[in-house]
Image (tube, helix red, strand yellow):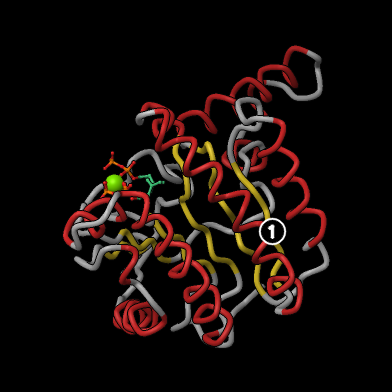
Amino acid sequence: MESNSNRIPTHVAIIMDGNGRWAKAQGKERFEGHIEGVDSVRECIKAARRNGVRYLTLYAFSTENWGRPQEEVNALMELFCKSVIAETPELKKEGVKVVMIGRRDRFSEKVCSHLEQIESSTAEGENLTLVLAFDYSSRDEITVAMQRIAKQVAEGQITPEEICEQTIAQNLYTAQIPDPDFIIRTSGECRLSNFLLWQSSYAEMYFPQTMWPDFKQEQFDEALEVYAQRNRRYGKL
Ligand code: IPE
Ligand code: IPE
Ligand code: MG
């Protein structure tokens, strides 16, 4: 699970933002920004692999994004399905294991089946774990974790006093995934928008101005250079 060097983050998490603004600046429809954004996903997977990053989490759709116009939501779901079909062979070849985090009870049957298909067909991947946060939000995740823990207490599996930080971490969607070392949000917005609130306690943060459709391998490499300059103290001296 360790990377080659502690200058390379084991886990990079990205809030892929700015697709709509990128499209607008080019006189295009918002959706064209999402399409170009898929190319950035491909590029960042390659760059992550090349640099020896072991976990790459991408925030693809938040629980709040259902509030966008139905047309855009439908287009994003369709783009997800198409991308799963198009990218699965390459992901398998590259040894990328795809894991989804988020709710699973609000997707159409079609989206659910694509989601299960990409997870099962890439399950053997050992080079990089690609975590897709899809219908994800951190408060939802923490709420679900609290329900699970309450149930364990009610059933007598643990006592309230036995609940520790690990209990909470193990009941999140990210139970099998180490905390992110480095969180990148593109487009210049400086907020987390309900992303990995528990897991990000000691993550380094980086907010480049670049819109997501312009964030390619070169920009990913530049971000890793920024990370390499950071001094992580974890409250110590
Ligand atoms: C990020 O780009 C993609 C998703 C949230 C699905 P946006 O669609 O938020 O683009 P902007 O922020 O409006 O430019
Ligand atoms: C965050 O971006 C969610 C994703 C990138 C999937 P948004 O564009 O939805 O966030 P806000 O509304 O600017 O905070
Ligand atoms: Mg946005």
State the residue in front, 18 or 55.
18
Q: What residue is rendered at 71% in x and 46% in y?
A: 114
Q: What residue is rendered at 32% in x and 83% in y?
A: 222
Q: Quadrant of the N terminus?
A: bottom right
Q: What residue is rendered at 67% in x and 24% in y?
A: 149
In this rendering, would 48 be left or right of 158? left
Q: Position of residue 75 (x, y in %)?
A: 47, 42
* On screen, residue 183 above or below 94: above
Q: Quadrant of ligand 2?
A: top left
* On screen, residue 153 above or below 75: above
**In this view, which residue lies farthest toward the top?**
154
In this rendering, would 99 be left or right of 122? left
Residue at disc 1, CB closer than 8 Å to ligand 1: no
Q: Secondary structure at mark 1?
A: helix
Q: Position of residue 180 (x, y in %)?
A: 48, 60
* On screen, residue 69 above or below 7: above
Q: Position of residue 21 (x, y in %)?
A: 21, 54
* On screen, residue 114 above or below 139: below
Q: Quadrant of the C terminus?
A: bottom left
State the residue in front, 235 or 62.
62
State the residue in front, 123 or 173.
123
Toward which corner of the image does residue 186 lie, by quadrant?
A: bottom left
Q: Which residue is mark 1?
A: 85
Q: Amino acid at mark 1?
A: Ile
Toward which corner of the image does residue 28 lie, by quadrant?
A: bottom left
